[in-house]
C-alpha cells in the first residue's frame, strides 16, 4: 500500500477530526493529500507524536483525534502505548505507517523489518482495539470503524517506502495557531 | 537531605511535606493547571496525591519524562494548561521534546522539578545533571526559578505560571531540598 494513497482514501472520513502527523514523510503526505487547518504538523521531537495526540485527546474528549505515526518513531517511545492503554482515551486513533525503514534518514531498516510486530506490542501494552492492514480498502474500513467506535485504537498500516517531498509550512507557530483556531482552543 | 536533620519526629516531617505539597497544588489549580504529566518520585508523592484528588485535574503517570512533556503539550493544543512533575534527571530525558517541540512551537507549561544532586545529596550519579540543570535549561532559553521556603511558593510559582501561560513558554520551578527535605536515604 502506498502511504499517500492511503491518506487520500481517509481524508473524506476525517470530518472535524484533529490529525497530528509525525515528522518527515507522514507530514509531507498528509499535507499533499489534504492540507486542512485541523492538521497539526510535527517537525521534530521524534517519538513524541503519539504522546501529543494522547494529551490532545484527553483535553478534547468530544473531538476525534487521529495520530499518523511511523514505525521508527513509535519504536523510540514504546512506553507511550502502555500509557495510552492505561488511561484509554476513547477518542484517540493511533495509525502507525510501517514501512520497515527510517525513511527520512535515508531508508535504513527499522527492527520491524527484522521481525518486530508493533500490533503485538500494542496488544501486549494493554491496547485491546488493534488491527493490521496492508491494502487500501482494509485501511479505509479500519479507520472508518475506529472513528465511529470508542477506542483507543491502534491501526498498523503496512506501506511501501515511497519518498516524496512536499512544501509543508515549516513555521511552528503558524502551524500551532492555525490548528488551535480551527479547533477553537486559542485563549482557552 | 533528610538524614542531616537530626530526628524531627516522623509525623512532623510528614506535616511539612503535606503543607508545601498542598500550597504548590493549590497554586497550580488557582492558575487553571488541569493536566499533569509525571514520573513517580518519593518527594512529590503528596503533591501528586493532592492533584489527583481534584476532580477537574487529570494526573497522568508517564513512563518517561519526554512522554510527559509531549502529552502536556498536546493538552495545550486542546486548550488545557499543564505541568510536568519530574526529577532533575528526568529533565535530561525530556530534553528533545522541550528543545525540538515545546520551545520552537511556543508551547507553555510548568516544569516542576524535584531537586537532586545539590544540598544533602547522597548519590554521586545525581550530581552532574543536578548541578548542570539551570545552565542546561538556560541554554534552551527556558527560565528557571527555585522554591526554597514556603513563603516563596505562592509568589514564585504564581509568577512562573503567569510567565509561562502569558508568554507561551515552558518555565521551570525547582523544588529545592531546602523546601522539601529531599529524598530520604533508605
Image (cartoon, rainbow, N blue to C red):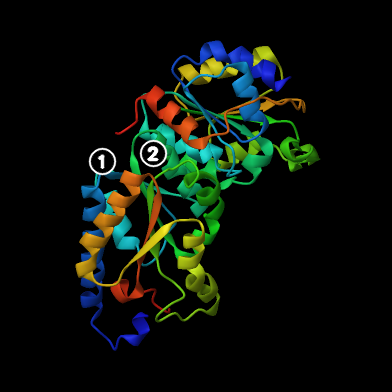
Q: Residue B7: in sight, yes or no?
A: yes
Q: Chain of mark 2?
A: B
Viewer-nearest of discs 2 and 1: 2
Vertical comparison of B159 with A180: above or below: below
Q: Quadrant of the C terminus of chain A?
A: top left
Looking at the rendered structure, the secondary structure element under dot 2 is helix
Residue topped by disc 1: B56
Residue B112 % position (x, y): 37, 58
Q: Residue A90: in sight, yes or no?
A: no
Vertical comparison of A90 with B137: above or below: above
- Considering depth in this image, is A4 or A90 the residue closer to the camera? A4
Q: Chain of mark 1?
A: B
The answer to whether dots 2 and 1 both sit on one chain is yes
Residue A20 % position (x, y): 52, 30
The residue under the point 32% across, 56% down is B48
The residue under the point 60% across, 45% down is A78
Q: Earlier in the sequence, mark 2 or mark 1?
A: 1
Residue topped by disc 2: B76
Instruction: Name the image quarter holding residue A6.
Output: top right
B145 left or right, relative to A141 = left
Vertical comparison of B90 with A103: above or below: below
The residue under the point 36% across, 84% down is B3
- Considering depth in this image, is B166 or B147 the residue closer to the camera? B166
Instruction: Name the image quarter holding residue A166.
Output: top right
B24 left or right, relative to A148 = left
Q: Quadrant of the N terminus of chain A?
A: top right
Q: Which mark is residue B105?
A: none
- Considering depth in this image, is A92 or A173 the residue closer to the camera? A173
The residue under the point 60% across, 22% down is A31
Is there CB contact under 8 Å for labels 2 and 1?
no
Residue A40 % position (x, y): 51, 29
Residue B133 % position (x, y): 48, 67
Amino acid at each position: 500500500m502506498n502511504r499517500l494513497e492511503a491518506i487520500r482514501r481517509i481524508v473524506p472520513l476525517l470530518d472535524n477530526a484533529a490529525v497530528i502527523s509525525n515528522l518527515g514523510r507522514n507530514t509531507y503526505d498528509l499535507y499533499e493529500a489534504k492540507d486542512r487547518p485541523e492538521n497539526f504538523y510535527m517537525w521534530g521531537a521524534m517519538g513524541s507524536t503519539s504522546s501529543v495526540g494522547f494529551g490532545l485527546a484527553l483535553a478534547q474528549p468530544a473531538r476525534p483525534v487521529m495520530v499518523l505515526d511511523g514505525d521508527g518513531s513509535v519504536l523510540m517511545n514504546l512506553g507511550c502505548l502502555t500509557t495510552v492503554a492505561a488511561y484509554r482515551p476513547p477518542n484517540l486513533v493511533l495509525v502507525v505507517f510501517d514501512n520497515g525503514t527510517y525513511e527520512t534518514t535515508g531508508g535504513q531498516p527499522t527492527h520491524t523489518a527484522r521481525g518486530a510486530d508493533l500490533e503485538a506490542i500494542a496488544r501486549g501494552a494493554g491496547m485491546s482495539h488493534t488491527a493490521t492492514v496492508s491494502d487500501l480498502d482494509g485501511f479505509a474500513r479500519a479507520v472508518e470503524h475506529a472513528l465511529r467506535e470508542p477506542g483507543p485504537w491502534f491501526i498498523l498500516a503496512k506501506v511501501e517506502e515511497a519518498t516524496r517531498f512536499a512544501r509543508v509550512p515549516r513555521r511552528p507557530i503558524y502551524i500551532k495557531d492555525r490548528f488551535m483556531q480551527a479547533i477553537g482552543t486559542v485563549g482557552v | 537531605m533528610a538524614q542531616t536533620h537530626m530526628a524531627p519526629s516522623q509525623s512532623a516531617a510528614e506535616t511539612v511535606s503535606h503543607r508545601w505539597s498542598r500550597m504548590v497544588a493549590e497554586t497550580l489549580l488557582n492558575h487553571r493547571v488541569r493536566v499533569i504529566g509525571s514520573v513517580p518520585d518519593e518527594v512529590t508523592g503528596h503533591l501528586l496525591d493532592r492533584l489527583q484528588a481534584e476532580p477537574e485535574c487529570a494526573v497522568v503517570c508517564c513512563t518517561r519524562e519526554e512522554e510527559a512533556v509531549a502529552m502536556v503539550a498536546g493538552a495545550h493544543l486542546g486548550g488545557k494548561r499543564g505541568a510536568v512533575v519530574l526529577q532533575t534527571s528526568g529533565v535530561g530525558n525530556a530534553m528533545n521534546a522541550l528543545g525540538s517541540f515545546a520551545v520552537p512551537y511556543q508551547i507553555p507549561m510548568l516544569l516542576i522539578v524535584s531537586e537532586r544532586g545539590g544540598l544533602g545529596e547522597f548519590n554521586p550519579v545525581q550530581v552532574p545533571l543536578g548541578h548542570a540543570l539551570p545552565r542546561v535549561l538556560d541554554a534552551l532559553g527556558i527560565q528557571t526559578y527555585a522554591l526554597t521556603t514556603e513563603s516563596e511558593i505562592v509568589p514564585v510559582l504564581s509568577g512562573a505560571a503567569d510567565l509561562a501561560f502569558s508568554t507561551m513558554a515552558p518555565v521551570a520551578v525547582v523544588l529545592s531540598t531546602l523546601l522539601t527535605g529531599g529524598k530520604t536515604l533508605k
